[in-house]
Image: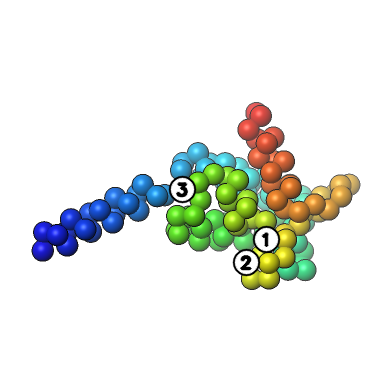
Amino acid sequence: MKSALWLGALLLAGQTMAATPAATRAEVAQLMTAVEKSGCKFSRNGSWYSGAEARAHLQKKFDYLDKNDMLTTAESFIEKGASTSSMSGKPYEMQCAGMKQVTSAEWLTAELKRLRQK
């Protein structure tokens, strides 16, 4: 019985240690806010969505990756969750007024660089 309790405590400790770092959470939250407030359109699997819809989708992907301990940096979120469709493998794209259409990975990476320079 003691060994079962010890194993359970170890498993819980491991889950706590593997969680997404707070700094990563903060940067990803800033990126999602930037997407939502950008006024840009977000393309996913051939359909265009508003910034608010894009944020909601990216939040679901973040939650999944976070729950499965798959994130260490904001860059890992961009790479694993915010650049391509996990269903089709097609890249996400951003279209902002007066600018050329770019992949979401390009847009988010540039935005992350801008946020870090503040």
For the residue marked with disc 2, what is the amino acid? Answer: Ser
Is 97 left or right of 34, judged from the image as shown?
right
How many neighbours does mark 1 have within 10 angstroms: few (below 14), some (14-19), or many (20 or more)?
A: many
Query: Which is more toward the observer, 79 or 34?
Result: 79
Is 97 left or right of 91, judged from the image as shown?
right
Q: Residue furthest bottom?
A: 87
Q: Residue furthest right?
A: 98
Tell me where residue 50 appears, x and y as whole percent: 73, 58
Look at the numbered disc 1 and give the secondary structure of its residue. loop
Residue occupying the point 40% across, 50% down: 18
For the residue marked with disc 1, what is the amino acid? Answer: Thr
Q: CA distance from mark 3 to mark 1?
A: 21 Å
Report the residue marked by disc 3.
20
Q: Quadrant of the C terminus?
A: top right
Tell me where residue 58 appears, x and y as whole percent: 61, 57
Tell me where residue 48 appears, x and y as whole percent: 77, 64
For the residue marked with disc 3, what is the amino acid? Answer: Thr
Q: CA distance from mark 3 to mark 2?
A: 20 Å
Q: CA distance from mark 2 to mark 1?
A: 6 Å
Task: For the residues labelled 2 and 1, say whether their Cβ atoms are less than 8 Å apart.
Answer: yes
Residue occupying the point 76% across, 57% down: 93
Mark 3 vs 1, N-terminal side: 3
How many neighbours does mark 2 have within 10 angstroms: few (below 14), some (14-19), or many (20 or more)?
A: few
Report the residue marked by disc 2.
86
- Which mark, residue 84? 1
Query: Which is more toward the observer, 71 or 50?
Result: 71
Look at the numbered disc 3 and give the secondary structure of its residue. loop
